[in-house]
């Protein structure tokens, strides 16, 4: 197998962690905003449904993270397949780094190569310390097992939280078992950092590249956090508009309350979308006529309404 197949194998799991972490970003911002807004004071939760959805989203973050972790250490999982890539997990060398950099950039950069070699060896030491101590070129099955055990030690508390507090919380635990800690958002942040470091180390030693992730949510998580916190502490939008004086201002200025404008607003959106479809269909028809010169068989596409895609 080539290094390309190994990096593709690693990327498959990197992508899964990126998808799972999307929840983490907005949850982190919401909890931070809750702390900053309340400043330790007691508030009644008026938006109990939104708060329940927040808790459910947090539980799903733990459940999904536990699921991928458990899947990676089980039969046919990541660490059971990793031994087949042992030949590609060689100890980084000046020669291998130089060859890789030259292929990537097309020119020699001795400083860059020295830095990559330094960080690659540091990554390798974290992954397979015995290989370097014993002056071997590749890890063996025992080294892979120890790496799997290290990964399991990182994720064990996540799996326990999932099993006892989230997915099976209403099932009675076995007699004598101690309660399992509910992981906080700070706990999960540290877990993500350790998992991402391990995955990044593997990427570094086999391809001399690294990866990082950021907030991939379409919504602005900072601004969304403020809105969610307002809905939790104050209630729905109508209540918030009344509390902020927006409802009365709009009534005085336009003769209509915000909630009365909702149906009209969606009606305008739908009308605009229909106009956009007509323009789009006419353009498709024009291209068809230019290409085929056959006016008798033109069938304009009946495009489905999809606000997420077509309405700005």
Image: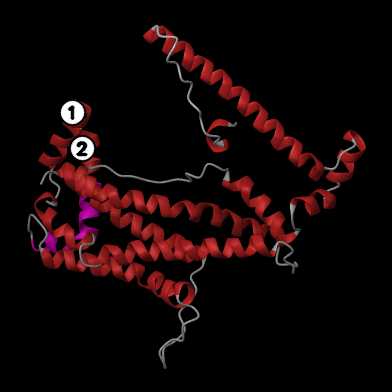
Residue 64, quarter of the rendered image: bottom left
Q: Main secondary structure of the magenta part?
A: helix
Q: Is residue 95 above or below residue 39?
A: above
Q: Secondary structure at mark 2?
A: helix
The quarter of the displayed image where residue 62 is located? bottom left
Q: Which mark is residue 219?
A: none
Out of 209 and 125, give the one closest to the viewer: 209
Q: Are marks 2 and 1 in contact (CB under 8 Å)?
A: yes
Q: Give the image location of residue 178, x and y in percent.
A: 44, 87
The location of residue 246, given as percent across then percent down, is 84, 44
Most foreground residue, 259 or 241: 259
Residue 304 seen in the current view: yes
Q: Is residue 117 visible?
A: no
Q: Return the residue at label 1.
A: 108
Q: Secondary structure at mark 1?
A: loop
Residue at point 90% right, 34% down? 253
> In the image, what residue occupies the spot 41% across and 75% down?
163
Tell me what residue is drawn at x 21 percent, y 40 percent.
114
Of the numbered discs 2 and 1, the one sitting upstream in the chain is 1
Inspect the magenta stretch and tell me whether residue 120 lies in it: yes
Nearest to the observer: residue 239 or residue 159: 239
> Distance from label 2 to label 1 (Cα)?
8 Å
Are there few (<14), some (14-19), or many (20+) residues within 10 Å of tag 1?
A: few
Image coords of residue 122 (percent x, y): 24, 53
Q: Is residue 271 above or below residue 188?
A: above
Query: To which residue does mark 2 refer?
Result: 113
Residue 281 covered by magenta stretch: no
Is residue 221 shown left or right of residue 180?
Answer: right
- The magenta span reads 117-134
Residue 171 place in picture, x, y as percent: 46, 82
């Amino acid at each position: 197998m080539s290094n390309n197949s190994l990096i593709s194998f690693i990327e498959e799991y990197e992508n899964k962690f990126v998808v799972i972490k999307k929840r983490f970003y907005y949850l982190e911002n919401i909890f931070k905003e809750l702390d900053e807004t309340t400043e330790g004071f007691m508030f009644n939760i008026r938006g109990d449904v939104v708060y329940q959805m927040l808790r459910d989203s947090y539980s799903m973050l733990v459940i999904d993270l536990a699921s991928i972790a458990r899947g990676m250490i089980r039969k046919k999982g990541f660490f059971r397949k990793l031994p087949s890539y042992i030949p590609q997990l060689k100890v980084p060398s000046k020669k291998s780094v130089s060859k890789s950099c030259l292929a990537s950039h097309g020119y020699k950069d001795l400083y860059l190569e020295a830095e990559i070699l330094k960080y690659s060896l540091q990554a390798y030491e974290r992954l397979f310390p015995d290989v370097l101590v014993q002056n071997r070129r590749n890890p063996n099955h025992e080294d892979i097992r120890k790496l799997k055990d290290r990964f399991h030690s990182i994720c064990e508390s996540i799996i326990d939280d999932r099993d006892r507090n989230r997915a099976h919380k209403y099932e009675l635990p076995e007699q004598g078992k101690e309660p399992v800690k509910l992981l906080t958002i700070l706990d999960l942040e540290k877990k993500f950092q350790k998992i991402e470091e391990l995955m990044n180390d593997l990427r570094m030693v086999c391809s001399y590249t690294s990866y990082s992730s950021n907030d991939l949510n379409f919504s602005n998580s900072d601004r969304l956090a403020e809105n969610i916190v307002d809905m939790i502490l104050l209630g729905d939008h109508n209540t918030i508009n009344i509390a902020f004086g927006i409802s009365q201002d709009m009534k005085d200025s336009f003769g209509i309350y915000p909630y009365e404008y909702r149906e009209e607003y969606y009606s305008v959106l739908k009308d605009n979308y229909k106009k956009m479809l007509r323009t789009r269909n006419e353009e498709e028809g024009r291209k068809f006529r230019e290409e085929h010169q056959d006016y008798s068989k033109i069938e304009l596409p009946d495009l489905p309404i999809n606000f997420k895609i077509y309405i700005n």
